[in-house]
Image (cartoon, rainbow, N blue to C red):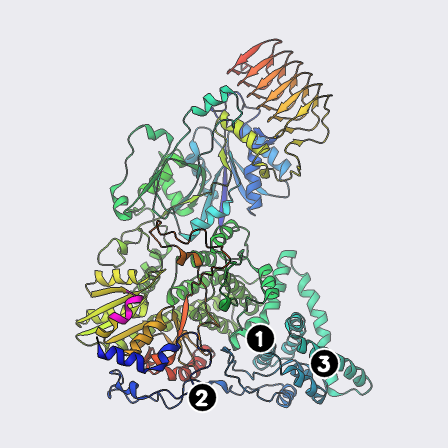
Amino acid sequence: MDPRRTARTVSDPKVRQVGFFTPPPDHAISDPPRHHDPIQSPSQSSPPVNDRSPSDSSLSPVMIPPPRHHSDALLRTALQATSPTKPFSPSTRTVMIPPENKDLRSPGRKVVYGKSPSSFSGVKASSVPASELTTVSVVNLALGISVEGKILTAEEAGGASVEVQNDRRASSKPLKEKTSKAERRALQEAQRAAKAAAKGSKASSSASKVVTSENTKPIKATKPSSQKNDGSQVAASDKKGGDRAPEKDRKKDAPHPRMQYDDTSRVEKAKKRAVVKQTEARNRVELFRHLPQYEHGTQLPDLETKFFELDPMHPALYKVGLQYLSGDIYGGNARCIAMLQAFKEAIKDYSTPPEKTLIRDLTARISSYVSFLIECRPLSISMGNAIKFLKSRIAKLPLALSESEAKTTLMLDIDRFINEKIILADKVIVEHAVTKISDGDVLLTYGASSAVEMILLHAHELGKEFRVVVVDSHPKLEGQLLLRRLVRKGLSCTYTHVNAVSYIMHEVTRVFLGASSVLSNGTVYSRVGTACVAMVAHAFRVPVLVCCEAYKFHERVQLDSICSNELGNPDAISKVHGREEINYLDGLVNCENLQLLNLIYDATPSDYVSMVITDYGMVPPTSVPVIVREYRREHLWS
Amino acid sequence: MDFQVVVLAGDTSKNLAPLVSKELPKPLLPVANRPVLYYVLHQLEQSNLKDLIVVVEGKETAVLVGDWIFGTFVDRLHVEIAAVPEVIGTAGAIRAISHHLTAKDILVVSGDLVSDVPPGAVAATHRRHDAVATAMLCSVPVSGPSESGSAGGKDKAKKPGRYNIIGLDPGKQFLLHIATGAEIEKDTRLQKRIIRAVGQMEIRSDLMDAHMYAFKRSVLQEVLDQKDTFQSLKQDVLPYLVRSQLKSEALLNGFPKAEETGNGKVSSQNKQVFVSQILANASTTSFHQPSSVDPDGYVSTRKTHTCCAYIASSSKYCVRLNSIQAFMDINRDVTGEANHLLSDTSSDHNNIIGPSPKLGTKTTVGPNCMLGEGSEMGDKCQVKRSVIGRHCRIGSHVKVVNSVVMNHVTIGDGCIIQGSVICSNVQLQERVVLKDCQVGAGFVVTAGSEYKRESLARKEK
């Protein structure tokens, strides 16, 4: 009936590739449709959008890690000797891009202990062809080292290096079990070689050997003393914190590899640590087994029962955790603000235990809070970035600062983060986005994004004449809340569900979408259904504008929505809220051959996104890595 | 977690007339051979709440209770005993110890609560909603003895329980109305304002206020200061807080946020509003938020506070010991179906028998029974669903059914005891028949007498 619609949906082959396609489209994307977009009007300086294909080549600028300075000359030379850059396989699903040299692995570590690097070339060769699955643990190893390198650069003190060695020893043990067979063998060989080297060096005292012996002795001296000084409980928690410290720093440098929940042994271990009792859901969809999914009914009451037993947990954090778990707070910005405010409370009440330094103890404390929050609900990327920020601020505190000063500084920092990265960013986004709304527009939005809501309200205040289409979807029906607020303000709205989006789309002139995160390859990670809306809009040549604060950007690259996602409560989709009579699935939920999938997020390929509106201006999605690279360093790690 | 626990251990209650006395105050009334207070303290200890304030009415009682607590929980709990004058009510008791309360929230537990509902759950609900008051509600217990009970027991079961009328929101999280037993005879008045704000109210009479509350300290203290006529937490304070939740008066300024913004600059206030708006928009709306009521959607100056309810699941055990019937029920349940309340029971069988009872030949002790240490029984006795205390001497041919026999009781040959409570040091001479009776401490029942539904006690000298 409508020639425009039919013609275009058929002609565009990419339409069929949302979500589950594994090999990225290797053909260069079609530029012409982009220039048709009314957004890319001449008023805007022609953006450097489509000069390279989005799949492989766009990764490359991000992949090349910036060089790092190692103060330890020995370490550096060793690393350079042993780490040729590993060819990057585009087929891996999550591509982690640590800013560190990626391929430092166990041999590099051993070098510090003063053995000839040449003896390890064979070892390295054997560890390289590890299968794809084990890459996670390899990254783990590499990251551990990279952190240590960082500590060295940061502190440049002899004491620091002692601790580094200490950490290294501690961390190498648990890692051993997780490695693949090939790697275990490699490690074994390495140890054997180390023994031989140690024997050899006994006779001929090389300089490196002196270093090791010096370093190892103080470790033994310091460790027991730190454990003795407090009561049993305190000592236990201290020890935990000490063990976790390197892990935290590791996170700071690179995205922590997500736990794969189909790896049973790891899941068991994680469960032992867990505060929230989590029973795994039984019927999980095969493709998403690697994601955590729990029986939702039991978590809340169980956590409530333990209310008084979690002594180290700050009440404010506990409250936020409960609110995440029960779904009282949702949405990237709100969750992030709630978490930061809880951290502020916790820091306010914090006092450094005797014989501790604030920097180390508070970091450990914060990460225990974070792991609690993760158990309540997986972190959003925005929260991850905020945590990263806070931890880097803690680490950067001058040692000379008194406790109260340090606390005030941190609390001001948190306020500054909320203020600059969220509130001001939203204001700037609104200013930018409003210029794209003109009289007579029909704007479509999906779900309930706080940024989009502000844009719409502001445009309405400016007296622009436009109409809003709110598209919503089950099971959360967040759009209804947005709709309610918009209608109250006097905007003229249309409300529909995502099923009807292809019908409503041809009267729409702009699509405004919120995002949970925008990743380095321009992929928009957002509420499930966003990809569908964006794709339909693209097919109808309607410009898609994604509003996302820059603090939600992430250097991760994700090609589909399978590898990293969150699974919601499957009951939410099997039951229809408010209509008890629809109970066709009752009693089937635990049936063997029924698997319910309630995805929370999806990934929209950058092809469907015309523009990302962020606090640094309106940029094409391909420019996201630039912002991540240029501004992130400046703001977070300065 | 910044909670303080106050246990209101109660007094020599009138409801339990012959059972409790000056020597045996209500907190020490044995339930399955342990003082009833033990169950509360044990439950709190399990939840890792080790700093307690126990409020007892009357000085002598306080000494008795204190002695027992220090004897039992030494090194395990840090308990402070506060003696308050009698007849000042629960609100008065809190008022009296008000200056000891410092934590952000106060957990008030009645000392006669026998329950396995974790107090943490109430506290967590309280915190999650940032409530001013949270009450634990549980389903009304099935009163009266179970199926094979005697006729007399059934009569008592027909007596209407102490029902509360409780109004909840559709999500069953907020308390919208509460009226306790005494007021129910009159007409119940519901507040139009609350109903209009919520839209829908569920009124239930099958829930019981279990007298475990979490209060925000600042609010509780202010209410107690301002309204000095309030006597009881249950009948005055809680209904008041529930009633006024949408027009929270100026005296309830226990909201730190409001205070903070007061001295800030205008710009920072704007930011606060902005942040709170983001948070409000992204959280599930409750009727308390003015934005859902006001058409303009801005945070208005009107203050509200929330009153929450924690509804214990029906699988949990939760009974208050506030009548003789309840006392019988609890004794039965604790030895029977709810025997997990007794922490150290290693009973593979259904009955719990102390270390050295001496049983005569052909004596049977049925299931759901408890026999204290050092008790002796003669030949051909029968004990069914009963609790027998320590150092009792029971003769031959005695039948004890559905009864509670406390410590140091002497029962002569041929007695038949059904559905009765026999306090300590009672002497029953031969061939006494008791049915649904309560025998006060130290009473001597002469040989061959028969009593039915009577309360026997020594005259006060």
Foreground of the two, B93 or A179: A179
Circle nearer the N terminus (3, 1): 1
Q: Which residue is mark 3?
A: A190
A613 within the magenta span: no
Q: Which chain contains the residue that carries disc 3? A: A
Using the image, name the chain to which the residue with label 1 belongs. A
The amino acid on which the numbered mark 3 sits, given as a three-letter code, is: Ala
Q: Residue at x 74, y 87 (%)?
A: A207
Q: Which mark is residue A133?
A: 1
Horizontal side, residue A178 vs residue B419: left or right? right
Per the image, label 2 sits on a secondary structure element best described as: helix
Amino acid type indicated by mark 2: Ser
Image height of A583 relative to A603, above or below: above
Q: Position of residue B132 (x, y in %)?
A: 38, 47
The reply, left or right, for residue B259 in relation to residue B345 is left
Q: How many marks?
A: 3
Q: What's the mark number on residue A57?
A: 2
**Of helix, strand and loop, which one carries label 1?**
helix
Left or right: residue B197 compared with residue A246: left
Quote the CA–CA distance across marks 3 and 2: 37 Å
Tell me the magenta residue range: A497-503
The nearer-to-camera label among 3 and 1 is 1
Above or below: residue B153 compared with residue B249: above
Residue A636 in the image, given as x and y percentages of width and height: 45, 77
